[in-house]
Amino acid sequence: MFGNVFQGKRVFITGHTGFKGSWLCAWLLKLGCKVTGFSLNIPTQPSHFEAMHLGDHIEDLRGDIRNREALTQAIQKTAPDLIFHLAAQALVRQSYADPVTTFESNALGTMNLLEAVRHCPQVSACVLITSDKCYRNDEQVYGYRECDHLGGHDPYSASKGCAEIIAHSYFTSFFQDGPACATVRAGNVIGGGDWACDRIVPDCARAWQAGESVEIRSPKATRPWQLVLEPLSGYLALAAQLLAPQPSSPFTLRGEAYNFGPSADIIKTVEEVVRELAVHWPGFTSHMANAPQTLKECTLLKLCCDKALAHLKWKATLNFEETIRFTAEWYHRYYRGRAQDESMLDFTLGQIAAYVHAAEARGLAWTA
């Protein structure tokens, strides 16, 4: 898998206590990496990080990416081969409530990370995770490409556009002969262990576990829904190439940006996601109440992932039904396992193994 590039590598992850970061930590452990995480706190209660007791298996550091000195010291001390930067304020609605922290964390936090990398020669590669919302969303019907305009109406989206611009500046100004770096863009990631506010799947899990109905803001809004492991497989495929580029490849990955998203048939509405999720929630019938929409949110968003296919031979693995099933099964196991003391790390690793098996069966290049 991934050409066995990751075995024994030292990997530093910012935002490792978050939903996507904790899944990435688990997969890197499975690949034989020594993982160090750097996060400000545990962002939700419950959390995927704590459900897996992940702090017992990695070096778990606490710090604020807005503190450049502390971040630099942590990276210099651990001397990683590879960095994944995920730490961010990740919620659109929260960005309206606290735009300053959003810009400081997402834009200046990215600058701090890159400045730290600039002063740590041991780093060989760095993957910076931004968002599909970094694009200026004009509600166009075709997927956004990596060369399309950056920007955003809300502070969150604008902050991610800023992060991309900062990253490009560092790539071209300082990293031409230094660490191999790239940015990645993905959105509407779902999967077990997400308990963030104002996200439809965690909202469903919380409500249905309590026997309540679900309030949704924009039932007809469409998004490129994908299981958390889909973009992570892309991030890892890209990182593997940055660490050990293929000599025969005609593409230069250094300094590039990549979209990772599902196939076109998984561009579903919020309402379709809720109804499909309800199919896998025994004893519950989909029963939704429309919540008032007071803040501007885009209703149409999808990505073009042709570049990832051309450069990395990457494409999504799962169909819509499989994506929802993986997600529902994790939550069911969690709520049942709390009483039975089942290991959520083992179950998470089992889902990773099942996802890899599906990718192997479908001939995905990164599985080799």
Image (spheres, helix red, strand yellow):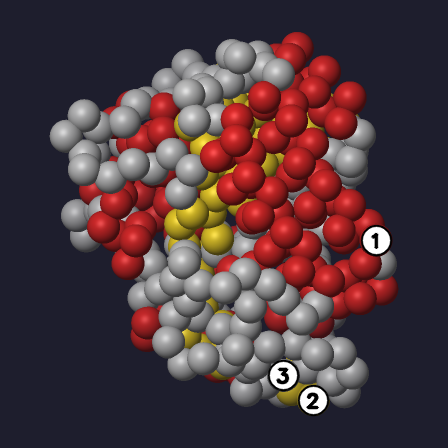
Residue under the point 37% across and 18% down: 7
- Looking at this view, is 329 or 1 the one in front? 1
Say which of marks 2 and 3 sits in front.
Answer: 3
- Looking at this view, is 109 or 1 the one in front? 109
Q: Which mark is residue 290?
A: 2
Amino acid at the residue labelled 3: Ser
Residue under the point 32% across and 74% down: 265
Q: Position of residue 258 (x, y in %)?
A: 40, 50
Residue 229 visible in this rendered orientation of the protein: no
Rendered-image quadrant of the C terminus: top left
Amino acid at the residue labelled 2: Asn
Residue on which the image places disc 3 = 218
**Crowding near pointer 2: few (<14 within 10 Å), some, many (20+)?**
few
Report how far apart the C-alphas of labels 2 and 3 lie in the structure: 8 Å
Q: Which mark is residue 100?
A: 1
The furthest residue to the left: 248
Circle 3: element type: loop
Lateral position of residue 193 relative to residue 210, left or right: left
Amino acid at the residue labelled 1: Val
Circle 2: element type: strand
Tags 2 and 3 touching, CB below 8 Å = no
**Crowding near pointer 3: few (<14 within 10 Å), some, many (20+)?**
some
Residue under the point 55% across and 68% down: 136
Q: Which of pointers 2 and 3 lies earlier in the amino acid sequence?
A: 3
Q: Position of residue 44 (x, y in %)?
A: 75, 50
Residue 80 appears in which quarter of the rendering? top right
Residue 145 appears in which quarter of the rendering? bottom left
